[in-house]
């Protein structure tokens, strides 16, 4: 049996957007074993994925933020993993040429990846992408696979276990009944970077929640363990004088459980972040707010979804280029999206979904 190695660490969103291409590749080449090298922090996204034969986690914190010796240790480990796998080809889903160097040093003859910076140096097969090309499409191109013509072929994969599904069912039964809307005010962070510019301001989320609570919805805040700094000010703002219909789930559930919960929701509201892509995997409509990043590259593709972006009115947007953000003080691209227009879009989407 032949082996192939896939390499992608860092963000939840990128890993999820890669899953349609993984599924298509494994379906086309079922006899080929896929070894997937990813980061320890987000390996739960690929847990139970039937299209991956072996999941190999690396210490991504050491890789991106560790000392020189820690980075060298993980790079050496990666080269050893690749050599021991006996892979005849490897697919690198990072755009930094230094990843290409690592796989070159591992001695794999057929090396696929992106053409950027040093134009695919150390690769045998390098593909070009455009600024408007969706990330999902670009991952298909790296694998040499045709992009599906129907959206069904582009859906993102998370595979919650039966135990995770059952835990979420028990959790929901303990709350009041009603129509559920999910909101993720945090995220936009991983072991490689913190990107506060991508977050919609908390005061806008607060006003949106006020209007949604007045409408009678149940609101659940979701996020990771580090997102309490964003969710706590919102729950505190509605702790007095309001019927208890706002709940904070951040940091309490696994990635699989989060996906299972989102399947119970009518819609998700968030900015460009990992939770946005988890909601996409759950198959629900998403109202997303974009600013410094190009929405055409990562926008949710689930039916009923909509994104706000003011980049066409600002000469500085999108300002995210080649993995870097500027030191912006105004964040006008995010501030100009109002809570009122997001609220109106939520109501519009819900009406369309119920018709």
Image (cartoon, helix red, strand yellow):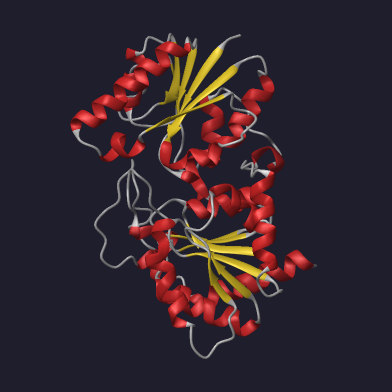
Q: Nearer the viewer, residue 164 or 17?
A: 164
Which residue in the rendered view is the most extreme toward the left? 68
Residue 243 place in picture, x, y as percent: 59, 85
- Pinpoint residue 183: horizontal percent, then vertical percent: 54, 66
State left or right for residue 298 relative to residue 52.
Answer: left
Horizontal side, residue 228 vs residue 281: left or right:
left
Above or below, 222 relative to 102: below
**In the rendered image, the vertical position of residue 301 relative to residue 213, given as above or below:** above
Q: Quadrant of the C terminus?
A: bottom right
Whether residue 277 is visible: yes
Picture quarter with the N terminus: top right
Residue 25 falls left or right of residue 221? right
Identity of the residue drawn at 64% across and 41% down: 159
Could you say where residue 5 lies in the image, as x and y percent from the top left?
49, 20
The x and y percentages for residue 33 are 59, 17
Camera-side residue: 159 or 121? 159
- Residue at 24% x, 57% y is 327
């Amino acid at each position: 049996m032949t082996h192939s190695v896939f390499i992608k660490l860092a963000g939840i969103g990128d890993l999820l957007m890669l899953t349609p291409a993984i599924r298509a590749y494994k379906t086309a080449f079922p006899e080929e074993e896929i070894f997937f090298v990813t980061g320890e922090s987000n390996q739960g996204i690929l847990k139970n994925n039937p299209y991956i034969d072996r999941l190999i986690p690396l210490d991504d914190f050491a890789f991106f933020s560790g000392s020189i010796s820690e980075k060298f240790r993980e790079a050496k480990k990666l080269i050893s993993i690749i050599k021991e796998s006996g892979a005849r080809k490897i697919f690198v889903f990072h755009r930094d040429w230094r990843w290409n160097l690592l796989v070159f040093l591992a001695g794999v003859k057929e090396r696929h990846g992106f053409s950027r910076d040093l134009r695919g140096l150390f690769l045998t097969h390098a593909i070009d992408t455009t600024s408007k090309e969706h990330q999902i499409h670009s991952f298909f191109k790296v694998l040499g696979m045709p992009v599906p013509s129907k959206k069904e072929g582009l859906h993102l994969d998370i595979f919650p276990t039966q135990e995770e599904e059952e835990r979420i069912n028990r959790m929901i039964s303990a709350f009041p009944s009603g129509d559920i809307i999910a909101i993720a005010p945090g995220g936009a962070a991983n072991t490689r970077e913190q990107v506060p510019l991508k977050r919609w301001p908390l005061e806008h989320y607060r006003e949106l929640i006020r209007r949604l609570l007045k409408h009678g919805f149940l609101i659940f805040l979701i996020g990771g363990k580090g997102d309490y700094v964003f969710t706590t000010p919102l729950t505190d703002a509605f702790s007095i004088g309001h019927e208890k219909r706002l709940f904070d789930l951040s940091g309490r559930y696994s990635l699989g459980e989060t996906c299972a919960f989102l399947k119970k929701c009518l819609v998700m509201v968030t900015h460009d972040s990992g939770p946005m892509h988890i909601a996409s995997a759950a198959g629900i409509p998403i109202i997303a707010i974009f600013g410094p990043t190009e929405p055409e590259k990562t926008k949710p593709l689930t039916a009923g979804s909509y994104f706000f972006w003011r980049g066409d009115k600002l000469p500085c947007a999108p300002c995210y280029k080649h993995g870097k953000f500027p030191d912006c003080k105004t964040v006008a691209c995010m501030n100009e999206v109002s809570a009122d227009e997001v609220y109106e879009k939520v109501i519009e989407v819900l009406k369309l979904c119920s018709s």
